Image (tube, rainbow, N blue to C red):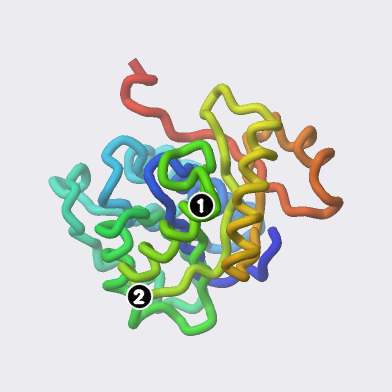
Amino acid sequence: MGAELKRITIFTGHLGSGKTELAINFALSLKERGLPASIVDLDVVNPYFRTRLIKKKLEQLGLTVICPRGEWMGADLPALPPDILGVLEDPARYGVFDVGGDDVGATVLGRFRPLLPPDDYHLWLVVNACRPFTRSKDDIIKMLKSIEKACRLQVTGLVSNTNLGAATGWQTILEGHQVVQDAARLLNLPVVMVAARRDLVEKLRAHLPPGFPVFALNLFMQAPWQEM
């Protein structure tokens, strides 16, 4: 990873960016390092790809999953559990937040702005350059500014996560990564990592500068129509 690890890591991004997969894999990577990790589902935007949908599976892998409970579990309303405060206030816990990337989703994050530990969190924008609204550097910058305005926090880095789902090849990732880098230069922000499906990682590393951080993804999320 091309950034110093901090106690709170927030992944945001537009619909289809892949931020939920990133958040899940990142939280599991913290657990593998022996760190007490919790993943917080703050996505009130996308009903199909939410961490809460695979809560039991993630708990079996040793993660603490914090999300709306009971009748609120499938709701689009920002009914947020008090357990979130425990993650934010306990200096011994590492929290990974999955946050919706439109104005509504980012506004939910803004509710916790006074509680975020100063200088102890990252807010990373996950970018898929194959998706509408983030296909160009100008689109990415516009999206970032919109999220910052809604949550009243500054993005601290970009995650390059260009993909076409199962049809993704390493060339697609590289082409999208160039777009993300162009936006990052204009924003004066780091690209903290390139994310790729695990079977593409070695090929991708061969075409990136030596040492550039590549984050291997295991895929957990499936749309309901894929599970039928």
When the figure is inspected, residue 54 is found, relative to residue 91, above or below; the finding is: above
Locate residue 209 relative to residue 25 in the image: left or right.
Answer: right
Query: In the rendering, at what x and y percent does residue 205 appear?
Result: 79, 41
Residue at the spot x=17%, y=46% of the render?
75
Residue placed farthest to the left in the image?
71
Residue at the spot x=51%, y=37% of the render?
130
Residue at the spot x=51%, y=61% of the render?
124
Residue 101 is at least partly visible in this image: yes
Locate residue 110 relative to residue 177 in the image: left or right.
Answer: left
The amino acid pointed to by label 1 is Val
The amino acid pointed to by label 2 is Arg
Q: Are marks 1 and 2 in contact (CB under 8 Å)?
A: no
Q: For the residues marked 1 and 2, what is the alpha-carbon distance in whole angstroms? A: 18 Å
How crowded pointer 2 is (Cα within 10 Å; few <14, some 14-19, many 20+) is rated as: some
Q: Quadrant of the N terminus?
A: bottom right
Which of 43 and 103 lies nearest the eye of the viewer?
Answer: 103
Residue 41 is at least partly visible in this image: no
Q: Secondary structure at mark 2?
A: loop
Which of 5 and 185 lies nearest the eye of the viewer?
Answer: 185
Residue at the spot x=57%, y=64% of the render?
157
Locate residue 109 relative to residue 219 in the image: left or right.
Answer: left
Q: Quadrant of the C terminus?
A: top left
Which of 29 and 100 lies nearest the eye of the viewer?
Answer: 100
Q: Quadrant of residue 166?
A: top right
For label 2, the residue is 152
For label 1, the residue is 126
Query: In the rendering, at what x and y percent does residue 17 appear?
Result: 46, 44
Q: Secondary structure at mark 1?
A: strand
Query: In the rendering, at what x and y percent does residue 48 appear?
Result: 31, 35
